[in-house]
Amino acid sequence: MTRPMRALVTGGTGKLGSAIAARLEADGYAVVAAGRADGDLSRAEDARQLVHRAVDELGGLDLVVHAASDGFAPRPVADVTEEDWDRAFGATAKGAFFVAQSAAPHLRRSRGTVVMIEDVAGYQPWPSFAPHSAAKAAQAMLTRVLARALAPEVRVCGVAPGPVAVEPGQEERRARETLLGRVGSPEDVASAVSFLAAAGFVTGASLTVDGGR
């Protein structure tokens, strides 16, 4: 009997993460969907412990999806504090690195995959979200750095969502920004993750999911 594929989804209790976890389960994965209660991923030791727990529960890893993030709050550049900066970089960039570092030996054995949930903010200058944009740019670079560092056994890809999970009342305005004339959904992001998890000849690349914005 063939064993199910095994996935860890960090940020797996949020809007995007829970949709990703549900899609992977529908694709036949056994999934550990980890949220804030499972550790503070701005701490390297918590990131390592989360990976160890997932490996113990699942018996290994074939896929890690890093959807954990923090610090998405509008603030003028003049008002940004050191705490804002540390919060944005903590789970998003630092956590992404240490989760991947800890998972790498297990993913090498399974010839597995890492998918980073990036953000179009990592490729566009958003003055009201300076720490968030910088943290997401760092994460996008980690997608490429880790793809080189972990090749050929492990693939590392990114998904950069645009206007999805939009705040209530903003749907019409944000829809006009896209070529498709609508906002996206967490399920749109989950579909992209599902594709990349199975796309065996894709690594070091990020898929923008923004309706052509």
Image (spheres, rainbow, N blue to C red):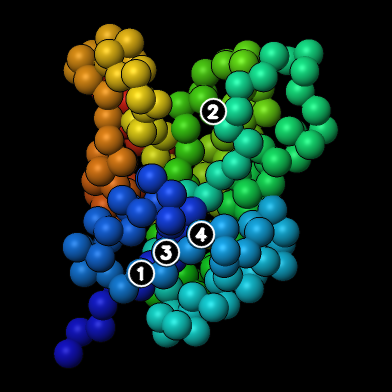
In this view, 192 is above or below 166: below
Check if mark 1's residue and mark 3's residue have beta carbons within 8 Å.
yes
Q: Amino acid at mark 4?
A: Gly
Q: Which of the two labelled residues, at mark 2 and mark 4, occupies the earlier sequence position? A: 4
In this view, 145 is above or below 26: above
User: Is residue 58 at all visible to an observer of this figure?
Assistant: yes
In this view, 131 is above or below 108: above
- Residue 145 in percent (x, y) is at 58, 46
Q: Quadrant of the C terminus?
A: top left
Q: Amino acid at mark 3?
A: Ala
- Per the image, the residue denoted by label 3 is 33
- Per the image, the residue denoted by label 1 is 31
Q: CA distance from mark 4 to mark 3?
A: 7 Å
Residue mark closest to the camera, 2 vs 3:
3
Check if mark 4's residue and mark 3's residue have beta carbons within 8 Å.
yes
Q: CA distance from mark 2 to mark 1?
A: 27 Å
Check if mark 2's residue and mark 3's residue have beta carbons within 8 Å.
no
Q: Amino acid at mark 1?
A: Val
Q: Nearer the viewer, residue 140 or 181?
A: 181
- Residue 125 in percent (x, y) is at 57, 16
What residue is rendered at 27% in x and 30% in y?
Answer: 184
- Per the image, the residue denoted by label 4 is 35
Q: Which of the two labelled residues, at mark 2 and mark 3, occupies the earlier sequence position? A: 3
Label 2 sits on a secondary structure element that is helix
- Residue 81 in percent (x, y) is at 80, 28
Q: CA distance from mark 1 to mark 3?
A: 6 Å
What residue is rendered at 43% in x and 56% in y?
Answer: 13
- Per the image, the residue denoted by label 2 is 122
